[in-house]
Image (spheres, helix red, strand yellow):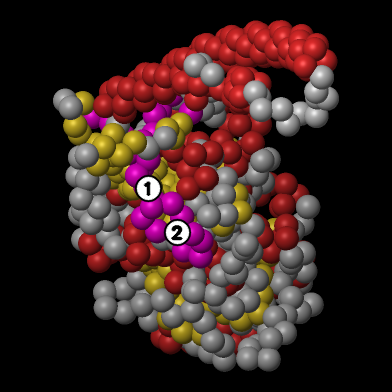
């Protein structure tokens, strides 16, 4: 139970950065968190109030809601090393 | 959509008033409408408060809702900070006139994993603006981003985009920035905000803090170029464009009382002109404050508002001091006709004093002011002079009649401590000590009074329990007689006058008795004459009888001799003698007595 990941990705519109982030996140989750993650993608163009509620400034922003504590990383998630470090995921290959 | 526009030909640029007293004046209308303005200053210089005031005034006075994006303080903190100014931030937020968005950035929480932008800020700002239809935006302070986000290139690109976005949305924005070392802002925000830059400064000189504000630039508009002092206290922000005063004040021919009837009488029109300035100079204890208070009381008596700036005494002490001279200020204070402002001269710098004074004058709008005393301001002469000149201009442009009291160290009327003030004044009354006969008395004279004739006398005055009284002047050999010398002279005069009256009465009595004597004598003489006349008449009658007898005798004798009597008879001598005697009779032997009549 402890190692289930609840991730939320904030983007704004279908910008190249948004699309890149979404693609990178999917790949990363499949690689490192197969079967133990849920991802929610929020487009702030549709729900701008969430930007305020969740203290979003830079986009894209990825928030690890679970496991605690809450972690946030920004950028298009192209630097996998940093993403893993930011999300506190051990860079072990799935077996 | 557009804010109130200042439709002046010299400044076609649309402006958004800040509603901050004095600032709009300096900005000739307000901030550039629909454009960003940079406000920079050191920590604690008032950037946030200025921004907050801009928003609150917009919401409450100009019908323009506003958004505050705070990178430093939480919404709650901001609301608490300005609550003491009477700004009800929660109510404004509830009424959808104000939105505060606190953007919290914790560097430790952020891992940069590739390309990003600050679209989140745009989304939030756009959302907040749209929610309440905001026209005003304050970003306080964007520089927090620099310390939180590592990638300065991205940040700078995004800031450029942000300012373009604000302009494009037609938002009048204030961006605050921390003062940098040798630059306006630490991160060079001034590069992005080219329209209007305002610098706030907080300087400490001689342990006295003075806040100043300067418009560094204002594209497309004229603006005040000086450093203007501003106040930040329980009344909020007040900018004081002091140097705007000039020599174009209107004058009045209306004459009002100085509050001392005797002094009024020394001035040609029976008082001073409304809106003029009066200097009362004198040594310590001469009664300057009492004269000032007399004027204040007279103003209140006429139903005109008066402000008394007391730089040496507290309100209570002032009331007691002048109360002993029969001037009751307390009732006027209670009815609000009189306001007493007490400030230690050393509490603030000159600028702050002027700024405070100006704000109070504009708020309270008195028609009369007493400055007691101007000489309590210490500093380099030229500065004090400039300070007093500006104070005078400030009062004159408002048409306020002002009494300045000035302490002189001796009876020398060009004594130090005057700061050249006397030449600026319309009326100058000097109080002096007259020392003679081992006592000190008070004398008053009018040195000058512009536009009116005035007495050249030195008049002694007394501070009685019914106010200041001027008494008649007595000139003695050594000059004006005062005090007991005057009293003894007065007594002497009384004795002399009495003596004169006695003398006249005495003369009258003497004449009356002489007249009585003379009249008695006249009566006696009349009686005597009457007696003599009676005597003469008796003699004349005797004589006539004798004549008749003689005639008869002669006739008898003639008849006996046979001769007619025709009056030519020879023996007539005796009868002629008699006729002579009859003619002279009244002059007889009493002729000398007659001569004295």
- Residue drawn at 49 percent across, 74 percent down: B247
Per the rendered image, the range of residues in magenta is B440-468
Q: Chain of mark 2?
A: B
Answer yes or no: is residue B136 visible. Answer: yes
Q: Is residue A77 left or right of residue B12?
A: left
Quarter of the rendering containing residue B135: bottom right
Q: Classify 10 Å Cα crowding around label 1: few (below 14), some (14-19), many (20 and above).
A: some
Camera-nearest residue between B43 and B101: B43
Give above or below for B427 relative to B160. above
Q: Is residue B33 magenta?
A: no
What label does residue B457 carry, if any? 1
Camera-nearest residue between A32 and B374: B374
- Residue drawn at 62 percent across, 38 percent down: B300
Count of residue discs: 2
What label does residue A5 carry, if any? none
Q: In the image, residue B417 lies at what x, y percent? A: 24, 53
What label does residue B449 carry, if any? 2
Q: In the image, residue B503 lies at what x, y percent? A: 42, 19
Prevalent SS, magenta region? strand
Q: Nearer the viewer, mark 2 or mark 1?
A: 1
Q: Secondary structure at mark 1?
A: loop
Q: Classify 10 Å Cα crowding around label 2: few (below 14), some (14-19), many (20 and above).
A: many
Q: Chain of mark 1?
A: B
């Amino acid at each position: 139970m402890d190692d289930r990941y609840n991730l939320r990705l904030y983007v704004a519109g279908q910008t190249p950065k948004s699309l890149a982030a979404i693609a990178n996140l999917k790949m990363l989750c499949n690689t490192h968190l197969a079967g133990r993650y849920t991802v929610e993608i929020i487009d702030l163009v549709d729900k701008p109030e969430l930007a305020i509620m969740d203290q979003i400034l830079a986009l894209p922003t990825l928030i690890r809601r679970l496991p605690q504590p809450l972690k946030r990383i920004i950028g298009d998630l192209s630097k996998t090393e940093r993403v893993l470090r930011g999300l506190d995921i051990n860079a072990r290959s799935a077996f | 959509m557009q804010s109130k526009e200042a439709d002046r030909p010299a400044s076609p640029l649309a402006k958004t008033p800040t509603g901050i007293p004095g600032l709009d004046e300096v900005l000739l209308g307000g901030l550039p409408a629909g454009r960003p303005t940079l406000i920079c200053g050191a920590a604690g210089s008032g950037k946030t408060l200025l921004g907050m005031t801009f928003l609150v005034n917009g919401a409450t006075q100009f019908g323009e809702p506003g958004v505050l994006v705070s990178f430093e303080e939480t919404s709650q903190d901001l609301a608490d900070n300005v609550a003491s100014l009477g700004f009800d931030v929660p109510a404004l937020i509830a009424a959808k006139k104000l939105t505060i968005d606190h953007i919290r950035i914790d560097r430790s929480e952020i891992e940069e994993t590739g390309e990003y932008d600050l679209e989140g800020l745009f989304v939030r700002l756009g959302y907040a603006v749209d929610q309440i239809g905001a026209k005003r935006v304050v970003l306080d302070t964007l520089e927090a981003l620099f310390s939180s986000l590592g990638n300065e290139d991205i940040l700078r690109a995004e800031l450029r985009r942000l300012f373009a976005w604000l302009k494009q949305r037609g938002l009048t924005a204030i961006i605050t920035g921390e003062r940098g070392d040798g630059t306006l802002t630490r991160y060079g925000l001034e590069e992005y905000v080219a329209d209007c830059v305002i610098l706030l400064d907080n300087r400490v000189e001689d342990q006295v803090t003075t806040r100043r504000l300067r418009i560094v630039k204002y594209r497309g508009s004229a603006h005040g170029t000086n450093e203007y002092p501003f106040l930040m206290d329980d009344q909020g922000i007040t900018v004081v464009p002091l140097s705007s005063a000039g020599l174009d004040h209107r004058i009045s021919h209306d004459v009002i009382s100085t509050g001392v009837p005797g002094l009024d009488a020394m001035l040609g029109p029976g008082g001073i002109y409304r809106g003029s300035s009066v200097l009362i100079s004198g040594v310590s204890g001469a009664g300057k404050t009492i004269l000032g208070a007399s004027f204040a009381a007279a103003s209140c008596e006429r139903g005109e508002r008066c402000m008394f700036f007391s730089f040496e005494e507290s309100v209570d002490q002032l009331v007691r001091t002048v109360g002993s001279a029969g001037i009751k200020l307390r009732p006027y204070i209670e009815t609000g006709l009189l306001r007493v402002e007490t400030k230690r001269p050393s509490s603030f710098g000159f600028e702050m004093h002027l700024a405070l004074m100006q704000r109070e004058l504009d708020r309270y709008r008195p028609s009369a002011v007493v400055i007691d005393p101007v000489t309590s301001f210490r500093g380099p002469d030229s500065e004090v002079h400039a300070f007093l000149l500006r104070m005078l201009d400030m009062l004159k442009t408002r048409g306020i009649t002002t009494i300045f009291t000035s302490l002189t160290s001796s009876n020398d009327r060009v004594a130090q401590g005057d700061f050249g003030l006397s030449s600026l004044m319309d009326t100058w009354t000097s109080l002096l000590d007259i020392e003679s006969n081992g006592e000190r008395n008070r004398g008053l004279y009018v040195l000058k009074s512009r536009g009116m004739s005035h007495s050249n006398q030195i008049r002694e005055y007394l501070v009685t329990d019914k106010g200041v009284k001027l008494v008649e002047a007595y000139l003695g050999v050594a000059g004006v007689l005062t005090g007991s010398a005057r009293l003894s002279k007065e007594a002497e005069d009384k004795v002399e006058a009495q003596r004169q009256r006695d003398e006249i009465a005495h003369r009258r009595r003497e004449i009356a008795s002489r007249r009585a004597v003379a009249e008695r004598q006249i009566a006696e003489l009349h009686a005597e004459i009457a007696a003599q006349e009676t005597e003469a008449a008796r003699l004349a009658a005797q004589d006539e009888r004798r004549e008749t007898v003689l005639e008869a005798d002669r006739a008898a004798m003639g008849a006996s001799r046979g001769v007619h009597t025709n009056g030519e008879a020879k023996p007539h001598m005796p009868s002629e003698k008699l006729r002579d005697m009859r003619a002279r009779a009244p002059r007889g032997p009493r002729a000398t007595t007659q001569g004295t009549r």
